[in-house]
Amino acid sequence: MKKIIVTGGTGYIGSHTVIELLNNDYEVHIIDNLSNSDISMLDRIEKITQKRPSFTQLDLRDKTEVISFFNGISNIEGIIHFAALKSVGESVKMPVKYYENNVMGLCSLLEAIELNDIPNLVFSSSATVYGSPKNLPVTEKSPIGYTPSPYGATKQMCERIIEDFTYSKSNFKAMSLRYFNPIGAHDNGLIGELPTGIPNNLMPYITQTGAGVRNQLSVFGSDYNTPDGTAIRDYIHVSDVASAHVHAIDFLTNYGESKHFKVNIGTGTGLSVLEVIKSFEKTSGIKLNYILTDRREGDVEAVYANVTYAQNLLNWKAKYGIDQMTKSAWLWEKAMRNIN
Ligand code: NAD
Ligand code: UD1
């Protein structure tokens, strides 16, 4: 059984990926400091897969602890590195916290990789590295753009650090997966996203409005140059994002040379805010209370991925559509709020 270390494995995308890995007979060890997740996730994972991943509570910023953790484990096939802080707005207010957590966390991990000759790394990157892309769909050859948030800058920096690290080694392969907009939840309603406070992202705001936790959704901007005037994004089901990681680690373990791959993870289809709302209304049977308001500062008009590279390289393709995304997100929201 191949042994994979998953950092941030009790978080939103990490937990869905751990399920995919366990279902594909990987041995999984999670490390997480539980700063944005809960230990009860292990029970939920076990309930879904009938397997329990091992777990160590560890802060990646603590390099000594990280190195001693890796010293105690042998024959690691690879690391999937999710652990990071991810709130764009908070990163603008607390930049140092974000640089310290996201960049130093990666550096600790790379030092452990170096010391233990771990051959494969999959890194959670983001479409945010492209900034405001000039041409659509966005391919991996699109230039890295200016990203206004420190969060986005940490993703660009981490990709650069991984690039340099890979170049310095002869037996190390890495893949940065640039996710577009992951939404939705596992289809049994047992795990999903746990946003703290008022959500910034569209999907949790929609489901919380549907559940009556928020009064009204503001649709940011209805004067964009798009068919219905609202902004367009490439929403992708979190379970599709999770399966991309299994394909990525499978690919890396079979690849021969040192190389850092960068791969878009999206569906290739752009949807407007109003289209997402319509899908939610259809799958939940709820009439959503929303108003059209001004554009949100920093938002771009349209971003969606070209996913040809992921399909060709990884033999992976997103299989869920928007109705399955909104349906599963609503199932999870209802489960969290005990709504029938
Ligand atoms: P999440 O917050 O649910 O999960 C991240 C996990 O990492 C949490 O369990 C948290 O406790 C842990 N963590 C954070 N800092 C840590 C540290 N220093 N040491 C140990 N554990 C730490 O986030 P998510 O949505 O699952 O995102 C996973 C990754 O994907 C992140 O790197 C994020 O930046 C990236 N990403 C997410 C999205 C998205 O929309 N969710 C989009 C693009 C990229
Ligand atoms: C945001 C981040 C991005 C991050 C991603 C996933 C910004 C500028 N970008 O992307 O870096 O990788 O989340 O975490 O913050 N919308 C509304 N009403 C709302 C919320 C959102 O209309 O209450 C609209 C937005 O204007 C946007 C779309 O919904 O057009 C999607 O927004 P969101 O879910 O926040 O994702 P992004 O802005 O694409």
Image: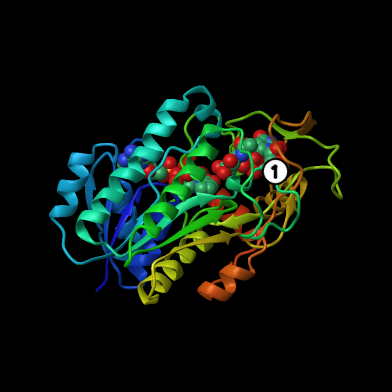
Q: Which residue is at 15% across, 47% downward?
A: 68
Q: Residue 14, how many percent across, how many down?
A: 40, 53
Looking at the image, in which quadrant does ligand 1 appear? top left
Q: Residue furthest front?
A: 168
Q: Residue 279, how many percent across, how many down?
A: 71, 53
Q: How is the image coloured?
A: rainbow
Q: Residue 136, how many percent across, how many down?
A: 75, 56
Quadrant housing residue 118: bottom left
Count all numbered tags in the image, as a single digit. Answer: 1
CB at disc 1 and ligand 2 closer than 8 Å: no
Residue 327 visible to the viewer: yes
In the rendered image, the vertical position of residue 278 relative to residue 78, given as above or below: above
Q: Which residue is at 35% across, 72% downward?
A: 253
- Residue 221 lies left or right of residue 58; in this view the side is right
Element at label 1? loop
Q: Which residue is at 19% across, 53% downward?
A: 70
Residue 36 visible to the viewer: no
In the rendered image, the vertical position of residue 89 relative to residue 207, given as above or below: above
Q: Quadrant of the N terminus?
A: bottom left
Q: Residue furthest left?
A: 72
Label 1 belongs to which residue? Answer: 132
Q: Which residue is at 18% across, 40% downward?
A: 64
Quadrant housing residue 132: top right
Identity of the amino acid at label 1?
Answer: Ser
Foreground residue, 30 or 336?
30
- Residue 260 lies left or right of residue 2; in this view the side is right
Q: Residue 299, how many percent across, how many down?
A: 70, 37
In the rendered image, the vertical position of residue 76 relative to residue 135, given as above or below: below
Q: Residue furthest top?
A: 93
